[in-house]
Image: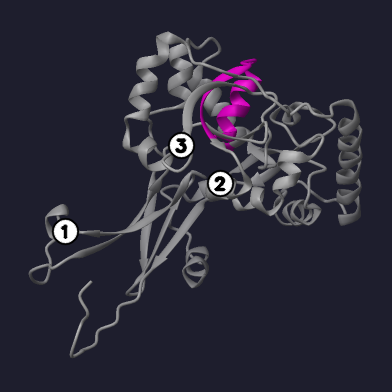
Amino acid sequence: MDAVRAWNSKRDLSDDPAEQDVIHEEAWLLGQPPLSRYLDFVSDLDSDSQRSRSAIVDEWRRANDYYAELEASEAGIADDAEIRDIEDALANMAQAVTADARWSRGFDTLPARIAMIELDRLVVSQPYVNLHHTAELKGRLGKTPTPADLFRFCLPLDRDEAPVQARRFGGNRFLFWSQSSDFRFHEPTLLQPGQITGHDPHGPLAGIVGLLVGYSSNFLSAIQCEGRLLLHNGYHRAYALRELGIKYAPCAVQTASRRDELALVASRTVMEDAAFYFKAARPPLLKDFFDPQIRKVLRVPRMLRMIEVNFEVKEFDTTHFART
């Protein structure tokens, strides 16, 4: 966290310092646990909020009561969400996706396929979306996309990534940041000297340890488990599609046949309360973002995704090194 504090003390990390203070609107689902998370978020980040904590809790409680009503009127609505085969005309595009390394590396654990999924009955675990980003996505797709346009929008192989900036803090610390919430640490890997170019070493290289930072495949993806579909990745695209009136979308669907399998692919948030998402009579759904009794629009500062990478080097002499 020292690097993050150092970053916060600087004002020259953006090409346009004024951009540091841009305000975006986010749509939040009220009434969803945990209340403490929402309360802290509004208290700390909502730029327009002058309300007391008790008023914020009252608002959340009303939405929570409304969910109780939905548990009776829409019990079981999340069960057996419709999944269709993709059109034959899109088969070649689907084959190109499944042949790509982003598919073979990202969807290699559980059975996975590309299918058309029903958006309204998608169970959601992320309680917010950035409306500025969804508006950009809608503009990119257009109001009347062709099936091929829709496929590329949901399962892109070619896309423009958000720019990344980086800074070194001390000898072994590096900080990377991007506007994209898809920005993440990938993995450590061992490379051979011939795999890098453009670097002049102090002497002959024996090996290279790479700490890889970048983006995911960013495919629209869902997890099928216990008769339900949980939206896993692509919340902003799913929201944009639903707002455009699109009811079905191409999606990468992974199937978990039991909770142990679910733990391999689901987020920590989901696994902390898997029964809520897969067994509750009326879990939160994508369509809830468009219900005024649940939806709350907050004005918040634009956030950056930051990744701090550091490493440790030890040198020592030994009389023997076991071979494996």
Task: Identify which residue, 235 or 263, lies in the foreground.
Answer: 263
Q: Is residue 67 visible?
A: yes
Which residues lie in the magenta part?
232-254
Q: Quadrant of residue 29?
A: top right
Bin the neighbour count of mark 3 within 10 Å (Cα to Cα): few under 14, some 14-19, many 20 and up: some
Instruction: Check the image and report above or below for 155 versus 12.
Output: above
Task: Identify which residue, 69 or 265, lies in the foreground.
Answer: 265
Q: Secondary structure at mark 3?
A: loop
Bin the neighbour count of mark 2 within 10 Å (Cα to Cα): few under 14, some 14-19, many 20 and up: some
The residue carrying mark 2 is: 261
Where residue 280 sits in the image (x, y, percent)?
79, 39
Q: Residue 192's mark?
A: 1
Viewer-nearest of labels 2 and 3? Answer: 2
Q: Secondary structure at mark 1?
A: loop
Q: Identify the mark nearer the N-term, 2 or 3.
A: 3
Identity, as a three-letter code, of the amino acid under mark 1: Gln
Q: Residue at x 41, y 38 (%)?
A: 217
Identity, as a three-letter code, of the amino acid under mark 2: Glu
The residue carrying mark 3 is: 218
Identity, as a three-letter code, of the amino acid under mark 3: Asn
Q: Is residue 162 visible?
A: no
Q: Residue at x 90, y 45 (%)?
A: 61
Label 2 to label 3, Cα distance in Å? Answer: 21 Å
Q: Residue at x 69, y 30 (%)?
A: 286
Viewer-nearest of labels 2 and 1? Answer: 2
Q: Identify the mark nearer the N-term, 2 or 1.
A: 1
Q: How many marks?
A: 3
Q: Identify the mark nearer the N-term, 1 or 3.
A: 1
Where residue 60 sits in the image (x, y, percent)?
86, 45
